[in-house]
Amino acid sequence: MEEVKSFILNNNLVKKGEVIGIGVSGGLDSMALLYMMNDIAYDLDIQIVAVHINHGIREESIYEEEFVEQKCKEIGVRFYKFRIDAPKIAQEKNLSLETAARDGRYMVFDALITKGIVDKIALAHHLDDQAETLLMHLFRGSGMTGAKGMAPIRDNKYIRPLLEFSKKQLEDYVNVNSIEHVEDESNADVTFNRNFIRNVVMKEVVKRWPNAVSALANFSKSLVEDDSFICSQIREDAVIRDNNLVQIPCSCFLYHNSVVTRTIFKALATLGIKQDIERKHIAMVKDLALNGENGKKIKLPNQIMVSKEYDYITIHSSKKDKLTLNQEFKSGEFEVKGFGKVVVKRVKDFDVNATNGDCLYFDFRKVPKTARWRFREDGDVFEKFGGGSKKLKSYLVDKKVPQRIRNILPVLADGNEVYVIAGVEISDKVRLDDGVTTCCRVEVKK
């Protein structure tokens, strides 16, 4: 008990006054965590509550839910119960049942933290889990980052107070203190990846190498410092965040491979993508940066699209909302998802020399009254500034406008004649003549 408290304090897992939600399934590990945390809560000056999630997979889950609720009543711990439909999530998102259950579980945890019901969630992962996680990551093609395994605290909201304690220690604690628990029959189902590692792979490994769990955990620890040093070599400007996408300059792919790999992982993590990315995916991104042609795209798991846009690799979600735009030409503002806010205003005090892509000035009197803001269409043409008509598509290519932007680029057009391309340029047909005192300004706020 004192060892667990020391581990929590040494790793700054909790702060005084915090409410800690304990993820309790009813199994041996989570029941041990519940009782331990309840016993040391006063010393740590924290409050604990139990959080149980029924994943909707087995009929026996109802019994486990009732069991945990009853035990919480007996020891005086507030109890929260939730139900999710993991099979439905798996079907709708095309996920494995194991991944769907995990995603659904963390959705509940995140909601509890976001709503301020708890400050952190404590999970019952232990030393054996750490060894299993390391092997799972390695088998899936992870590098050093994945081999680090689980951290005592993640995102400053998920804590693992038992991470340095073995399954045997937890079993001894439960037996000595006569703590009841339930056995989840699905834990024996080796069609689940973790169960296969635990019940087949590790079971045979420890027969030959009894110290295997500790050895794997120690190996994982030794990688943490090495990985931290390599990550410190990533350039500060290597990952550029812009709304819902990130960009990596192609020049960054010329660095040492270990630094490049972590740069890609950092970019993905910036978008919240931390699962299902394997070494083969990282290799695909590297190849795209170094050998791919401009405009080429590749798809990664979790509906992530990676494209080469001239001197940058751009990473963003490939989820597409059907967007429409049919905006009257007048002073005001409108917003286009993924592009930004377009502000249209008539002004008298202006400097035509200040014109740039994000702030354009033009003669509104030269724009037909029937012109409207819309997205580009087939057949659109544009009179280049200085003269010379060109197809809008070709013009955007010449201006190096990324392909993902072209279809959500607001244009002021009448028929197929485009007069203003928001954030890019104005047509020569609406240029300001000398002596004009009032004009229209189109500003893009990304």
Image (cartoon, grey):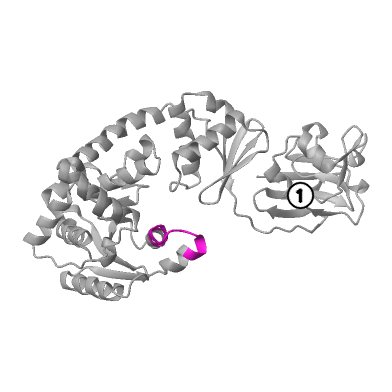
Name the residue nearer the viewer: 230 or 61.
Answer: 61
Any magenta on residue 96? Answer: yes
Disc 1 residue crowd, few under 14, some 14–19, many 20+, Cα 10 Å:
many
Q: Residue 2, how many percent across, how many down?
A: 11, 49
The location of residue 258, given as percent across then percent down, is 43, 28
Name the image quarter holding the C terminus: top right
Position of residue 266 in the picture relative to residue 415 (left or right): left
Q: Say which quarter of the image contains residue 297.
A: top right
Q: Is residue 146 visible?
A: yes
Q: Residue extending furthest top?
A: 255
Q: Secondary structure at mark 1?
A: loop
Quadrant of residue 106 within the rendered picture: bottom left
Task: Locate residue 384: give its quadrant.
Answer: top right
Q: Would residue 440 be visible to someone looking at this image?
A: no
Position above or below: 96 against 143: below
| Residue 433 or residue 337, whichever sits in front | 337
Along the line of sight, which residue is nearer the eye, 65 or 216?
216
Residue 267: percent from left, percent from top = 50, 39
Q: In this picture, which residue range is highlighted in magenta? A: 91-104
Please say if 385 is above or below 344: above
**Is 272 one of the magenta-colored residues?**
no
Q: Which residue is mark 1?
A: 410
Q: How many marks?
A: 1
Q: Please name the predominant secondary structure of the magenta segment in the image.
A: helix
Q: Residue at x 31, y 56 (%)?
A: 121
- Measured as percent of width and height from the top left, residue 53 is found at 33, 67
Q: Residue flagged by tag 1: what amino acid is it? A: Pro
Give the residue at x 75% y 37%: 357
